[in-house]
Image (spheres, grey):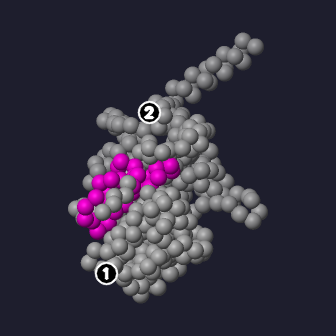
């Protein structure tokens, strides 16, 4: 009996040891997770072939228009890196199989071919690479196709959002038959010097995206996002931390209006205090398709009651709902809140909110634990582009825009402290007299 030596990053050794239904790794660039999992699929194929098993290893990605978009070349490279594996496989331009023909690789894209996956037989192993964008429906269809008693699902991905189906299934689940680890560049014993130079360059020149690309963090800012650099600076300066409310100052709730129903826009609220030259952002809330009573309940249950908190609404807050003949303004007033409606700023309203937020960002402090969802939205809020003409079309109206609009409303409503204005006026007057 001969023994083969398989080199893996040390953090992956327990992942592949013992029994499991699901094995996986997530993290940033340069971790060797994809190459390691590709190699281990071939090791498993070798073991099953030597044991006389027959079946297929299915390699999936969410998006795969052709084999060029698949894991085919990664598996080929992994096999060729081990002479003892290479002599056991037949590798063609579009196929990989053991020389006996008992074990073969197949490749599929889940976004367009998920129905065909259901009919595949004898899947011994399914490896889903670049799994972050895989939607919940695809997981629901794919997982039951693994019908062999010892079939396994392997998953590798670079995290983007906490709300992704992949994150919820494989990082939030508590399952002792699941072995999943975080793997980043520092966990790769063979991390190449060229990637180290690239990493350091990104850290210096692209700090907004560095943590996501190299450290496996979620996307907090999108390249080209309006507030990307402002959020990065706030984090570096310690302005995203533990921020307490001043008990002697009133709270302010700045809203962006949504509607009821599954397809309605989200309703967003930022809770803040204006204290001197500081804006303390204390809390964030967003809900979709819920009635006004739900939003008021959230305010009151978090001690943002009318005796302590005032409401700011955009100009359409005074418009009556076409079904219930009641406006958000009147609804909040009926609940006892003092309400201010910001007048319509015209066509340039979105740009005005963005510029006001950028100008005030150096004075803004965020309570870290309660504003994460809102900060995610600010980091994503970006300009929509016309790809053909290469021009900007204004803010993209997506999931992030509602919280971003409420945040912009807060900045438009901010009033410079009266003491400073009087001081500036006196100085201006003195200067004019002296001249």
The residue identified by callout 1 is 147
- Which quarter of the image is occupied by the C terminus? top right
Which numbered marker is on residue 216? none
User: Residue lying farthest left?
Assistant: 176
- Tell me if mark 1 has few (under 14), some (14-19) or many (20+) residues whose alpha carbon lies within 10 angstroms of its own: few
Helix, strand or loop at disc 1? Answer: loop
Q: For residue 254, say whether it is visible.
A: no
292 over 182 or under it: above or below: below
Span shown in magenta: 6-33
18 over 49 or under it: above or below: above
Q: Quadrant of residue 346?
A: bottom right
x 53%, y 65%: residue: 76
The residue identified by callout 2 is 238
Percent x, y of residue 423: 57, 22
Helix, strand or loop at disc 2? Answer: loop
The one of 12 and 240 positioned closer to us in this rendering: 12
- Which quarter of the image is occupied by the N terminus? bottom left
Percent x, y of residue 352: 63, 48
Between label 2 and label 1, give the one nearer the viewer.
1
The one of 388 and 424 positioned closer to us in this rendering: 388
Q: Earlier in the sequence, mark 2 or mark 1?
A: 1
x 56%, y 66%: residue: 73
- Magenta stretch containing residue 27, yes or no? yes
- Magenta stretch containing residue 308, yes or no? no
Percent x, y of residue 262: 42, 74
User: Residue lying farthest top?
Assistant: 434
Q: For residue 114, say whether it is visible.
A: yes
Percent x, y of residue 175: 24, 63
């Amino acid at each position: 009996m001969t023994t083969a030596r398989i080199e893996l990053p040390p953090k992956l050794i327990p992942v592949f040891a013992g029994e499991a239904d699901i094995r996986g790794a997530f993290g940033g660039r340069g971790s060797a997770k994809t190459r390691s999992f590709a190699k281990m699929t071939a090791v498993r194929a070798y073991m099953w072939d030597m044991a006389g098993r027959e079946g297929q290893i299915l390699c999936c990605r969410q998006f795969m228009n052709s084999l060029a978009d698949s894991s085919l070349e990664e598996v080929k490279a992994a096999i060729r890196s081990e002479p003892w594996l290479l002599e056991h496989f037949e590798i063609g331009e579009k196929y990989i199989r053991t020389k006996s023909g008992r074990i073969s690789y197949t490749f599929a894209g889940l976004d367009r071919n998920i129905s065909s996956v259901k009919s595949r037989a004898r899947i011994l192993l399914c490896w889903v690479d670049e799994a972050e964008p895989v939607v919940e429906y695809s997981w629901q269809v794919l997982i039951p196709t693994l019908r062999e008693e010892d079939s396994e699902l392997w998953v590798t991905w670079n995290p983007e959002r906490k709300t992704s189906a992949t994150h919820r299934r494989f990082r939030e689940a508590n399952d002792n038959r699941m072995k999943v680890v975080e793997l980043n560049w520092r966990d790769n014993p063979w991390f190449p010097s060229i990637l180290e130079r690239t990493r350091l360059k990104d850290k210096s020149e692209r700090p907004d995206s560095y943590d996501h690309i190299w450290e496996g963090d979620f996307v907090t800012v999108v390249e080209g996002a309006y507030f990307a650099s402002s959020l990065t600076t706030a984090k570096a300066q310690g302005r995203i931390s533990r921020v307490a409310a001043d008990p002697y100052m009133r709270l302010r709730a700045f809203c962006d209006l949504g509607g009821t129903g599954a397809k309605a826009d989200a309703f967003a609220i930022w809770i803040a205090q204006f204290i001197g030259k500081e804006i303390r952002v204390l809390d964030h809330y967003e809900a979709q398709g819920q009635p006004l009573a739900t939003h008021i309940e959230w305010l009151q249950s978090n001690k943002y009651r009318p005796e302590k908190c005032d409401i700011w609404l955009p100009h359409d807050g005074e418009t009556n709902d076409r079904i219930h003949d009641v406006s958000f303004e009147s609804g909040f007033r009926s609940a006892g809140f003092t309400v201010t409606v910001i007048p319509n700023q015209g066509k340039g309203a979105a740009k005005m909110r963005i510029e006001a937020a950028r100008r005030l960002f150096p004075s803004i402090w965020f309570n870290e634990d309660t504003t994460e969802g809102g900060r995610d939205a600010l980091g994503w809020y970006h300009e929509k582009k016309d790809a053909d003409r290469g021009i900007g079309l204004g803010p993209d109206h997506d999931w992030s825009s509602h919280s971003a609009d409420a945040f912009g409303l807060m900045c438009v409503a901010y009033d410079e402290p009266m003491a400073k204005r009087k001081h500036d006026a006196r100085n201006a007057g003195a200067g004019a007299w002296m001249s």
